[in-house]
Amino acid sequence: MSTIANDTMNDKRRIYLSSPTMHGDEQRFVAEAFDTNWVAPLGPNVNNFETEMAAYTKCGYAAALSSGTAAIHLGLKLLGVGQGDIVFVSSLTFSASCNPIVYEKAQPVFIDAEPDTWNMSPRALEKAFEKYPTPKAVVVVHLYGTPAKLDEILKICQRHHVPVLEDAAESLGSTYDGKHTGTFGQIGIYSFNGNKIITTSGGGMLVSKEEALVQEARTLSTQARDPARHYQHSKIGYNYRMSNVLAGIGRGQLMHLDRHVQLKRAIYARYQEAFADMDEIAMNPLNPRGEANNWLSCMTIKEGSSVTPNLVMDALETENIESRPIWKPMHLQPVFSACDFFNHNESDTSVSEDIFARGVCLPSDIKNTEVNMEKIIGIVRQLFGK
């Protein structure tokens, strides 16, 4: 397709799942940080990155932090999560979505996915509220860049007077009803890890419409130092602030976010078109009320097929092509084996487990060329005898 990158790569080079793409603008902001000696976790790039992100997402206010995980951790603290509290969280996600709950000695309760978007199931969420009517917070993940069913989830949480923290780590640039993901809950977070749609090498952002919450996040992220001439601390803080150098990378990346989203969507569309004649393969579903950034394009294999996800990943790896399993649901992880879980289904295998068992994350790097895409697609089709 015309929107997929031009063929400038050697076929023998590794094809990545999702690697950083630099443009040159990043170097300009980084050089400015060095030239002005602003290399600390403070400075003009940090301030401007926050302002530019707030303007892009219309989130209100933003605090640039060292990682998306740090943003979730501070977000939970700002919502008052503490020892013994119950926090509902998506099960089909990466562990960073729920580890910070345990940092605060709270108890994660896992909510199944639903089949329409692979995100938190409103039906399973209702079941969780029946057993635990007063959780401290709900953490909703927008998996692989596809917006969750926010209208239904927010209505449930509002009825129970429980705040929502949006984990939009994978969905920067995605929208729901024309509004950016990460801006619906009381607090939202983004990740700029190396494989995300834009990167600062490592970094994250906490956002909110409430200025006081974001200001408190900035305070906590710089060791919670009191406004005194000497070093005085009235509460526990963290070393979570983003450096001015990394913020410079982020500013340069943000200038190209819309183009990155366009290329990711083109990759998804290319896979969808290529597998349209195969009833053995289905692409990850999209939310019709939103516009996904298609951070990763994923597929599931029809139940009962002799081709398994491992066979697909092994065949791609043989050709030096990176792919990945779907996230293993958190309620299946040994470390969370004692935690409660609420199934979308009335019985049988949960939606999360089914997607994990049948799914593969396909190479979704925006530097993929048409030749790369044809190679990936050809390998997958050949496994199914196509």
Image: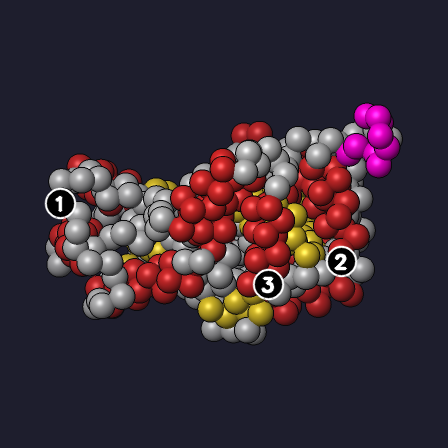
At x 68%, y 57%, the residue is: 61
- Earlier in the chain: of badge 3 and badge 2, it is 3
Whether residue 292 is in magenta: the answer is no
Marks 2 and 1: which is nearer the front? Answer: 2
In the rendered image, residue 98, in percent from the top left (x then y), is placed at 61, 40
Q: CA distance from mark 3 to mark 2?
A: 15 Å
Q: Does residue 380 appear in the picture of this structure?
A: no
User: Which residue position is annotated with label 3?
Assistant: 55
As drawn, which residue projects farthest toward the top? 231
Please indicate whether residue 62 sits to the left or right of residue 266 in the image: right
Q: Which residue is mark 2?
A: 210
> In this figure, which residue is indicated by the disc labeled 1?
11
**Mark 1 nearby-residue class (10 Å; few <14, some 14–19, many ≥20):** some
Q: Is residue 364 left or right of residue 162?
A: left
Residue 245: give x, y in percent of width and height: 51, 38
Q: Nearer the viewer, mark 1 or mark 3?
A: 3
In depth, the one of 248 and 93 nearer the eye is 248
| In this rendering, the label closer to the viewer, 3 or 2 | 3
Q: Position of residue 30 (x, y in %)?
A: 46, 41
Residue extending furthest front?
A: 35
Q: Three-letter amino acid code at disc 3?
A: Ala
Q: CA distance from mark 2 to mark 1?
A: 49 Å
Tag 3 or tag 1, which sits nearer the N-term?
A: 1
Element marked by disc 1: loop
Residue stretch in magenta: 224-232
- Mark 2 belongs to which amino acid? Glu
At x 22%, y 39%, the residue is: 14
Q: Quadrant of the N terminus?
A: bottom left
